Image: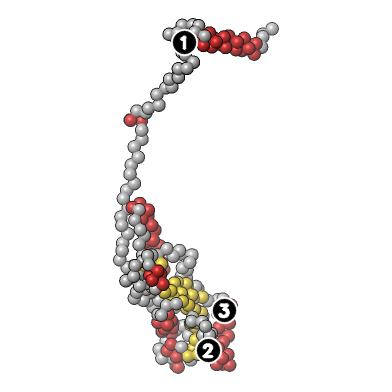
Amino acid sequence: MQRPRFIKSALLGPIWLLGLLLAACGGGDPATTPSVAEPIESPSTSLDAASVAVTEEAPAIAAPPSGPIEAANVSDARDQLAQLDQSRRAYALQTGSSLGSSIIDVSWDYGPCEDAASLLPPPMETWGIISDLSRGEWPSTAEMARITYTSVDDTLDPTSAEYGASKENVSIYISSGTVGVSGMADIYSNEQLKDVKLMPGPFGYPIRKTPQGYAGRTVLLGPYLVQLDGTGKDMDRYFETIVKCGIEGGLIADGVDPSALQVTP
């Protein structure tokens, strides 16, 4: 009968220990037996230079354009703005430089105003759009559009408190097919409610009366509810621009007499 292998292993253990004891006591050949105090050399870990992979440097990123964005329409402007913001961030990351001003000078062809997106006017002089504005925060479709314009005093130091205090914003929100639109449509089509809720606006077009303490503007242009809010002194200029373009584009709410307007639809 074959013996189990563990018996052989058990016999080898004591023999191996005996060899170590003899070496420690000076037994054996000193030329071939390493001292316990002497370190055992490990294999060399140096690598041949040829075996080291050479990492190529990433290609340099060109500096992003610094001029204004000129687009055919608001959707094109939004796309260009997103691309510019991406290139500015990549360049700043690679070079370690500052992003610079986040307010971008952008413009697009305005009119005719036929839907929500086309009602959005381009920023006026000294106004711009924040460069990192995401597309989710800046929708522009036929049914809904929203945008915010920003202006600062560029003559001031960007790191100063005065620079931040000089910032002004104007936000524009245009919607259709909502409960708010239906409620405003009821006001425009009801003569009694018109006298109570509306007042003459730009070019004779009736607009929502402004509640006390609220500086915003509200108007119904055709099926589109236009609302403006902000701190900018030019908010009324933006509002007048939108109303004028809406009238010229035939966006007249039911209950508004086109012949009474100072602008021809």
Check disc 3: other Cα within 10 Å, few if <14, some if 14-19, many if 20+.
few
**Label pair 1/3, CB-CB below 8 angstroms:** no
What residue is disc 1 on? 33
Measured as percent of width and height from the top left, residue 93 is found at 37, 53
- Where is residue 12? Give x, y as percent: 59, 10
Q: Which mark is in front, 2 or 3?
A: 2
What residue does disc 3 label? 180
Q: Counting residues from the N terminus, which is met first, the one under dot 2 or under dot 3?
A: 3
Separation of marks 2 and 3 at Cα, in angstroms: 15 Å
Pointer 1 or 3: first along the chain: 1
Q: Residue furthest right?
A: 1
Q: Is residue 7 left or right of residue 55?
A: right
**Residue occupying the point 41% across, 72% down:** 165
* Quadrant in the picture for the N terminus: top right
Of residues 97 and 80, the one nearer the viewer is 97
Element class at badge 1 = loop
State the mark number for residue 198. Answer: 2
Q: Which amino acid does label 2 sit on?
A: Leu
Residue at x 45% of width, y 93% of height: 260
State the separation of the CA atoms marked 2 and 1.
Answer: 107 Å
* Residue type, label 1: Thr
Question: Identity of the amino acid at label 3?
Answer: Gly
Q: In which quarter of the image is the C terminus?
A: bottom left
- Marks 2/1 in contact by CB < 8 Å: the verdict is no
Q: Where is residue 47 in the image (x, y as percent from the top left)?
A: 37, 28
Q: Can residue 97 be seen in this view?
A: yes
Q: Report crowding for label 2: few under 14, some 14 to 19, many 20 or more residues within 10 A (C-alpha).
A: some
Which of the pair 198/78 is nearer the observer? 198
